[in-house]
Image (cartoon, coloured by chain):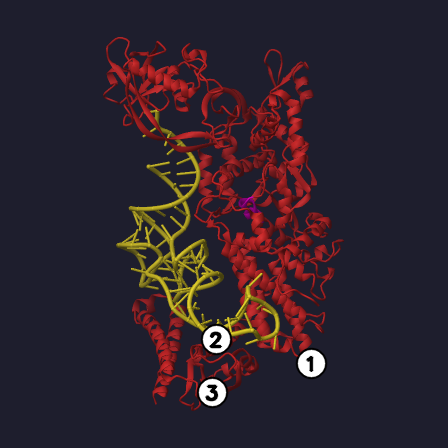
Chain colours: A red, B yellow
Amino acid sequence: MEIPKTYDPKQAEARHYARWEREGCFTPEINRDPSAPVYSIVIPPPNVTGSLHMGHALQHVFMDVLVRYHRMRGFRTLWLTGMDHAGISTQMVVSRELKKEGLTRHDLGRERFVERVWEWKAASGGQITQQMRREGASVDWSRERFTMDEGLSRAVREVFVRLYEEGHIYRGARIVNWCPTDQTVLSDLEVERNPQGGKLYYLQYPFKDSARRITVATTRPETMLGDTAVAVNPNDERYRELVGQTLLLPLASREIPLIADEYVDPEFGTGAVKITPAHDPNDYEMGLRHELPQVVVIDHNAKMTEEAGAEFAGLDRYKARELVVEKFEEAGLLEKVVDYEFAISKCERCKTVIEPLISTQWFCRMDEMRDMALALLREEGKPRFTPESYERVYTNWLENLRDWTISRQLWWGHQIPAWYDEDGGVYVARDAREAAAKAGTDKLTQDPDVLDTWFSSALWPFSTLGWPEETEDLRTFYPTSVLITARDIIFLWVSRMVMTGRKFVGREPFRDVYITGTVLDRAGQRMSKTKNNGIDPLVVFDKYGVDATRLTLAMVASTDTRWNDAQVESYRNFANKIWNAARFCLLNSEGASTGCGFEGAPESWALHDRWIVSRLNRTARALEEALASYDFHGAVQSLYHFFWDDFCDWYIELSKQDVTANESSAARDAARSRALTVLEQALRLLHPFMPFVTEELWQMLPGVGRESHHAAYRESDASPTVMLTSYPQAQEALIDERAEREMQSVIELVSRVRNIRTELNVKPGEQVRVVISAGANGAQKVFGQSVAQIMRLTRASDVALHEEMPALPRASARQALSGGVEVAVPLEGLIDFAREAERIGREREKLGRELEKVEAQLSNPQFTERAPAEKVAELRQRSDDVRQRISALAEMQEALEG
RNA sequence: GCCCACUUAACUCAGCGGUAGAGUGCCGCUUUCACACGGCGGAAGUCGGAGGUUCGAAUCCUCCAGUGGGCACCA
């Protein structure tokens, strides 16, 4: 058999995914066990405009690990994928294309524009679906969904109608966040606030009936044209007498009142605030409280209106600002201008400064659904967040939830299912026919607006499964098992899914929520398009392989982590290590039986065999525990150390002599079978994390086939694959504490002898003699069984075992081990006495320090009285052990001096 | 301003009440027949600071500092 020395990830990655997909391995239907438990995950649908970034790759790894793991455990497993129509983003992308042709969407008209978007989607949307295949994501492509699909659109209309009928959805004029560039309203969550350097202008407004003036401070002087009051705090001594008086609004020549409101902070600015109800959310609220008129001076294009006055009408808001300031200065009413830093609201997509405007929009009241979500958490602990701390983030937000602006002035999206008759009557219905029936006429016009993209996303866990139909999929896979996502959409998405799921399906959409960490760049900054500091996962795949990248991401788990190529490289090396361990087993597989090689009672097996089986089962147990608690970091650690340290460094080395024997024999074949068996089990354990290298190697193993599959998959037509084998489950009976302890003492012995060899400069090729005194307890038997292995691993010509250390030549290097074991390496003609004395001295010092610490604790009566007896006994044991080793070392030093 | 998380070896991170760990890097030795993307051995940390609880604290509590994030904003 020809096997290259180095693993080539690309080769393996190109081979397996297409076959898995073709043979239906990713669909739940592959599972033929009617009583199989169900495991399901819906993917956070990436934008149709999106391409794969590190954040996706990160989430996908966790989902794929869990999905592959549960599939191997025989669960009827569904990982449902799809895409989001991403209203604003997609409309922007297609508009940009049109611009290249010198067109705007208005030139096309709505219908043709929407057609054009669909064409764009067909041609270049959804790059990410191909990229996900590259990741190895075992999603069920046969159930792929798109938020604008007919089925999902129907769910959207159904939810809208029901919410409307129950009075949760209403239409009205409110102050909203308006993006003058995108020409649409935005929800609070689509607005970002950034600190920005600006100016604070102090403007003076004269009183009507006196020569007095009052000074107000503002960052937006142009809005003063729409002022309808000035407010002060009712307890502010400076202004108390003046409240109720009339002011003359400069430039506008309008009379406005001086009012009192608790909202005003007397400490800030001058303690007097200009009130512009039509252009500021806080002023809007105050305007309602005081029944102030709303004067609209800025329009949807962020230009001044006629109402702003002839001089200003048509001016851009920033031009108007300059002009207002100029006019105030001319009038001697500009008190001062100071530099000031404040938070400015911008459109999350296009970064244009938001203009708060009064506009007629559709809103959704959240109080009832909010209360249901809070009760669900309080009473049933659902969803359960990992890490737990996000539970508070979630509840705090819910508690302060306000009405949700759900309409958008876009063309791409779910058009609002509301129709108007010629008299302006509103008919909310599932379709035009139903609306016509309600209206008693078909002379209706549908509302031109579409719904917020997140409205459809909020329904994702059930709309994708066929709701409102009572489908088989909905019954089977809802609620899903876990939702995995980044923390930035807990509000935008997670909370809304909980609310709609609970309300419309009657159950929570998922039991658990796992919030991933964030992959930061090398400098600790978030990766972003604008900073251009993103690391492309596809480039990393090319450089180090998908499996290595997956392990790196799995290690990130829920901690924010700086990207570090060295980490990926180390897992690339790990993949190579797996490859070569398998290579060794395969090159020595001739004669291996189809049986597992572990025949008969475990007590009859060699120590290293009992040990590796114990380690294997312990690892399986650790994996089960880690994955049940979403401890991906711990899971990777366990796998890595089991495979590299236990299997490669020790098991293969310990069994090498048997496995590589020249003569064919039953013993050799059994040893070969055992190595292959452990390897095969290890590949299964690794598979959810490293699907490609494990499949590549598993395919080469002798004796694997469909009969290796989990019972649930044996009847399926899929060709043999490691992904359908059963995941190793820990058998407690095979976890052998004693074997692990005994093996540990052999490992310690070998390590100490190697240490002597290195420290005393014994050449690698030089053979040594090893003398062991094992005391009267069982250690002698343990080492006795392992003599051949000890010889091999320490390059010894001879291993002598004694109860007591015999007389040794002065030129001997010695080590005291735990459990009263001593080892000596006679080194006639090689040993440097001074150097050896020094080495022993160092060792003795180290132990001395430890003894001091242990003794201090033991001599503390508080400790011996209050600590658990078990802990005290443990410490006494250690104290004895260290003491014994120290005295052994002292003896050795004396011998050297003698 | 409020809330949350983080601060452990040079770097990236585990550990979260009972002898300080891993990977990378570093220092030796090593191309012996699975693997130099390897093997063997080794050095390296007053666990951000200060208090407190406890027989015992990296781990629990309080305060402080720094970093990151979220929420709310004062016009």
Labels 1 and 3 in the same subunit: yes
Q: Main secondary structure of the magenta part?
A: helix
Labels 1 and 2 in the same subunit: yes
Residue highlighted by disc 3: A803
Residue A708 is tagged as: none
**Is A555 positioned to the left or the right of A849 in the image?**
right
Label 3, label 2: how many angstroms apart (C-alpha)?
Answer: 21 Å
Residue A751 is tagged as: 2
- Tag 1's secondary structure? loop
Earlier in the chain: of badge 3 and badge 2, it is 2
* Location of residue A482 in the rendering, given as x and y in whole percent from the top left corner: 57, 46
Residue A778 in sight in this render = no
Residue range corresponding to the magenta coloring = A53-60
- Tag 3's secondary structure? loop
- Disc 3 or disc 2, which is closer to the eye? 2
**What's the chain of the residue with tag 1?**
A
